[in-house]
Amino acid sequence: MKKTNFDHYLDEQLTNPEFAGRFEHAGEAWDVAMQIADLRRKAGLSQKELADLLKTSQQQISRLESSSYEGHSLSMLRRVAEALHARVRVVFEPEASTIGHVADKMEAYRS
């Protein structure tokens, strides 16, 4: 697939470590927001109905489903998950530059 002008621009911007960090964090917030919205829709609930279940406001649910919101608390995520018959998992992954590969350790297998 041919790269668009935006693809080239993004590639250039991602060479800036500060921009790349912000871009990655935005992706994490986007993932959380989309998962909450998807689970809510699959449960057949509106934002208002989910808010009522959680004894909070529709505006709070809207914030949780916003890709720019980064104020998620673990306790609120647990409440949302319970109401939507899901569970919360937090995974810490090593940064790509620190991940070792089996092929890198082939010397250990040679006699």
Image (cartoon, rainbow, N blue to C red):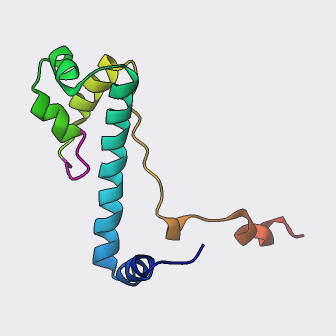
Main secondary structure along the magenta-highlighted residues: loop
Q: Is residue 39 above or below residue 34?
A: above
Asked which quadrant contains residue 50, the reply is top left
Quick one: which residue is furthest to the top in this view?
A: 53
Residue 7 x/y as whole percent: 44, 76
Residue in the image at 10% along x and 34% along y: 59
Which quadrant would the C terminus be assigned to in this image? Answer: bottom right
Count of residue discs: 0
Residue 27 x/y as whole percent: 35, 56
Residue 34 x/y as whole percent: 35, 42
Foreground residue among 43 and 80? 43
Asked which quadrant contains residue 108, the reply is bottom right
Start-end of magenta stretch: 65-70
Residue in the image at 73% along x and 68% along y: 105
Residue 10 x/y as whole percent: 39, 77
Residue in the image at 20% along x and 18% along y: 49
Q: Is residue 11 above or below residue 29?
A: below
Asked which quadrant contains residue 61, the reply is top left
Which quadrant would the N terminus be assigned to in this image? Answer: bottom right
Q: Is residue 49 left or right of residue 55?
A: right
Quick one: which residue is furthest to the right in this view?
A: 111
Foreground residue among 97 and 34? 34
Q: Is residue 76 above or below residue 64?
A: above
